[in-house]
Image (cartoon, rainbow, N blue to C red):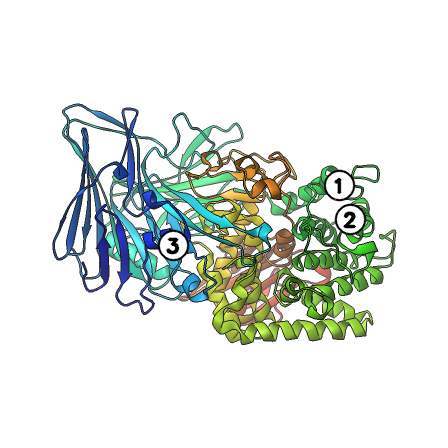
Amino acid sequence: MENKQFRIEISPSGNLTNLVLKEDTNKMNWVIDSSYLTQSGYDEKDKLFGNFSLKIDGKIISSVEIFPTIFQDDGQAIVTYTFDQVEAIMKYDLTQSKNRFVWNITLKNRTANALNITDFVIWSSFSYVMFRLNDLNLQTNHSAAVFPSISKSYSKLACVRRSNEAPHLGMYQTKGQTLSVGTYCAYNNLFFESVSPSLDGLLFHQLILAGGYPEGFENADWLYEKEGFILSGLSEKEWEYSLEPFKDQSDFYRIGQKNYGHPIFEFEPLAIAEQNYEFAFELPGDQYLTDAYVEYLDAAVDRKRESIFADIKHEKNKHHAHLFFTIPGEHKITIEINNQYYDSVILNVMEPIKKIIENRSHYISDVLFNGENSEIPYSYSPISNQGESLGKLSLVLKNNLLGHTNVKEVQKVESSCVYYIRQKWFQNGDFAKPNKVYGDFYRCMDFEYIAHVFYLLSQFEENILQLHHPDTYLSWAADVFSLRVNPDLHDNHRGKEEAGMLGVFFLYIDELMEELKSRGLTEKYEEITSLWFKIAQNVAMNSQTFKAAVTEHFYDNAGFGPATGALASTQHFDAAKKYGELVLANIGFSNDFRAQSPDRWWEALSYMIHSLWGGVTAAACLKAYEEIHDSRYLKAAYRATIGILYCYDTNAKATDMKLTAGEAASTYSIAGPHINRPDLSRNRFGQSTFFRDGGIFTRLFTKEEETADWDMGEELVAYLDGFGKKTFLYEENGTVSVVNGSIEKTDEGLLITSYAPYPTEYHFYDRNLHFVSGNGKTIPQVLLVDGKFKINKDVLLTRE
């Protein structure tokens, strides 16, 4: 069947098996294809688009149990599943509009008795696929990231092509209520078979219309409903979704408003307790606001609801308010429209982030450090062969460089560098001879984390360090970095290949080169500079094929994230913009701050936040903004960052894992339910929690109880170098907005309050206005007056 915009196919079992946008030159199938499942050895055909299951009075029935009757004409297919008690009807309709595809779901009670529906879940399996083939055209143009926005009356899904090339596909709720969107993961991982790329898989998305969780399931997620419903005798209940293509994020929201009456929100994902917060939304002309309120859990974990209706000002069709939150934790703002419809956003209110980072540094040093007489002296728990685990040490050093220096914390890291790191990863401490810590191989990527720790250690004064001169550590950093990026220093194919790949070192390479040059280590400076620019040039030359998007995995933000940041900082702008589109498509947009994350699904087997690679991707996106000055990168980088901070947030109340001061969890499952592991739904955890699931996880981890933060730290160092000190202003449609801070009109000018823990920089690229404080002095507020930054009427800050 087809209309002007869509071509669709329905299988004899009633599934939507083909969904193509006719204007799409790639002819992508936007739903998971059963033929791909067959050829790749996946047997999840019960999760194809349109399959469903119901629990009625405790009994489960499913669409896969029976064959439906299908009535089809030129523009409409009606698929009817008839059971003893109910009839489920799927209507796939192309006749309502030439540019629309309407999916209607009707549940009819065939009996005179009321039925208790505790579960009703339907698979909406869009093409969220990491293909097994190392084909970047497949990975970028035939796969989509799926970003959910859930609300009582206005749920929607944005399916974004991974190349970020329009057309994308939007699905808008027009009838009924969608409680949530769950995910199920099917995957194949060959990590230990020394195969690279080693991972492929799919996420199947499930619309939760009732229940969605195992019987008796409870978790801390108070933000979304999990209830069932009663279907009275001989009655019916209806849900409907309309699908349309869209061009970009703003177009997705404009279509929702213009065609389906969905409000458009303007909200920042983060508020800081006791500081001003700006909130705004836009309603269609025929809608009016009838109520507005905010919900949160107080310190006693009691649910509170406060009206903000009186705070909201109305100008034309725009509503806005200055809000002020005092209690940290997740906050849900709900607006009521025309006395009957409800939409909402979820933001996080955090205590000052500086406190969180300081607590983290103390915890790593006081709790995770293993002393001289421990089983593994001078290490930090949990023990890992992967260099990512050393990000903790870099964070301790960075925090001590920016804030008050705790000499003992620095010296513990120093002893770890000398007595543990050097001996573990290198034969007899020889930086030219890496140990095969993975049995028969080593990973070049580990060395970039080691080099970073050594580099940061070299930034301390000589009187703080105990074992070597700062220049010694700088020299070590240079040697290890050379090993990381010089193929000639490796005698095996894997080492030579990985040496030419980009990684997190793009975060600090410029500073490392500057220090080598200024301290007179000229030979090492020249060697590293040559290697660095050669790698960047090679990546730029291969950008047309997205070669750097492939790492150990077929398609990975650990590849295209660093590629974007590295290419931008080395002035390869055309190549940076090409990879940058992959980053923008990877970072979510949603009404829930947690669903605005960069995705790396395999760490959680779910749509997720991964602290390390989400944070590195966010940092790369910010670097791209600083060089390219496209505000899409700025806003995406900030959205991504707030989700990362959630992994460290000790005041979070909507997740089962609660963190004490200084604790952290590397992973957060955005999806609810997490169908593979319902206990992980909207929960924080470490990957070792999968140990009990068997398979590859028993080889990656030694026990389920391993701490949840083994690979964390590097992303907070990246944060501290970016939003940790910088606040940005940008201008759109004549309005000045702020990212990483709040903005308030005063009699003196625009008052900008930074959310950065160490606020030292203010940038307004659209007007070429910049201020950087001297000697790292923190300046939490500035005024923008007559096109200049000022502290007060007398002190001019702007340096153009």
Residue at left offset 44%, top offset 54%: 588
Q: Does the rendering let one see residue 317?
A: no
Residue 503 drawn at (x, y percent): 62, 61
Looking at the rendered structure, the kind of residue marked 2 is Val
Residue 189 drawn at (x, y percent): 52, 50
Marks 3/2: CA distance? 50 Å
The residue that disc 3 covers is: 39
Residue at left offset 43%, top offset 61%: 139
Looking at the rendered structure, the kind of residue marked 3 is Gln
The mark that comes first in sequence, 1 or 2, is: 1
- Mark 3 nearby-residue class (10 Å; few <14, some 14–19, many ≥20): few
The residue that disc 1 covers is: 369
Marks 1/3: CA distance? 48 Å
Residue 13 left/right relative to 490 = left
Helix, strand or loop status at disc 2: helix
Mark in front: 1 vs 3? 3
Looking at the rendered structure, the kind of residue marked 1 is Phe
The mark that comes first in sequence, 1 or 3, is: 3
Q: Does the rendering let one see residue 577?
A: yes
The residue that disc 2 covers is: 413
Residue 445 left/right relative to 336 = right
